[in-house]
Amino acid sequence: GDSVTQMEGPVTLSEEAFLTINCTYTATGYPSLFWYVQYPGEGLQLLLKATKADDKGSNKGFEATYRKETTSFHLEKGSVQVSDSAVYFCALSKGSGNTPLVFGKGTRLSVIA
Amino acid sequence: DAGVIQSPRHEVTEMGQEVTLRCKPISGHDYLFWYRQTMMRGLELLIYFNNNVPIDDSGMPEDRFSAKMPNASFSTLKIQPSEPRDSAVYFCASSFSGQGGETQYFGPGTRLLVL
């Protein structure tokens, strides 16, 4: 079945450091890919998405590119802030997107000043 | 818009009791999803609806779990009887089938503890 694998955490970085969280997927066809973020005690918020190969999703300084050849959707940010501390989930959905999300295990990021 | 609303936010109950979780999707959204988050299994789908009709309930753990969507603005997830292994955070999410509708919007979740 479809699955998402993302790097295990926790990840601890100093403020202004470069962030990469790896995500690879296994799926038939052409899924849509997402990064969701979960702040402490809150629900998941969409961070960015890409719906076809070579698309780049971006938001709040975060970027991820849909790479079909490597089945990857790695999340990057050039300079993290303390406020970026959260759990990040990579996810995919099939078809139109109004289908269930398949999530990775999540990566906890802590940014220290 | 108020976003997806879930209640209660926290629930503590004893094993064997009935638990009912509630969700109000974003107005105009025609898809509704129930997910469960645990440390062991991460986030997993329980059931989802389209236009109030259940489409896939294969993620519902067992007969103790049931979900309904009597109208477009309300859904319930019921556990009867509850067990300690049901302790988790339960999220409701909604989306719409129109252009750009592939984004699911999540509620704040209900944190359930079964003693």
Image (cartoon, coloured by chain):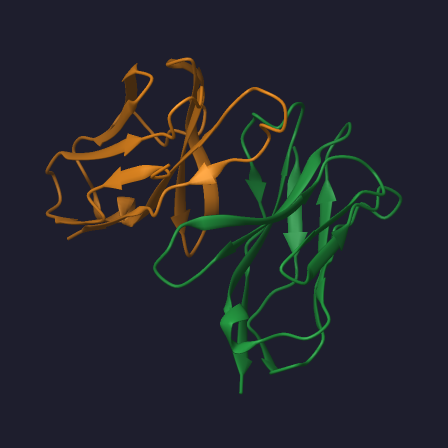
Chain colours: A green, B orange
User: Percent position (x, y) of residue B2?
Assistant: 33, 39
B70 is higher (above) or lower (below) than B23: above
Residue nearest the viewer, comparing B38 with A78: A78
User: Percent position (x, y) of residue B82?
Assistant: 18, 38
Name the image quarter holding the N terminus of chain A. top right
A14 is higher (above) or lower (below) than B7: below
User: Percent position (x, y) of residue A55?
Assistant: 80, 42
B11 is higher (above) or lower (below) than B32: below
Q: From where the camera sits, is residue B51 visible? A: yes
User: Percent position (x, y) of residue A8?
Assistant: 60, 65
Residue under the image location 17 percent in, 30 percent down: B80
Residue under the image location 64 percent in, 44 percent down: A34
Residue nearest the viewer, comparing B7 with B60: B7
Q: Say left or right for A26 vs A45.
A: right
Q: Say left or right for A94 vs B14.
A: right
Residue under the image location 69 percent in, 35 percent down: A32
Residue under the image location 44 percent in, 54 percent down: B40
* Residue that lies at the very extreme toward the bottom in this rendered image: A113
Q: From where the camera sits, is residue B66 visible? A: no
* Residue that lies at the very extreme toward the right in this rendered image: A69
- Total labels drawn: 0
> In which quarter of the view is residue A91 placed?
top right
* Residue that lies at the very extreme toward the front in this rendered image: B1
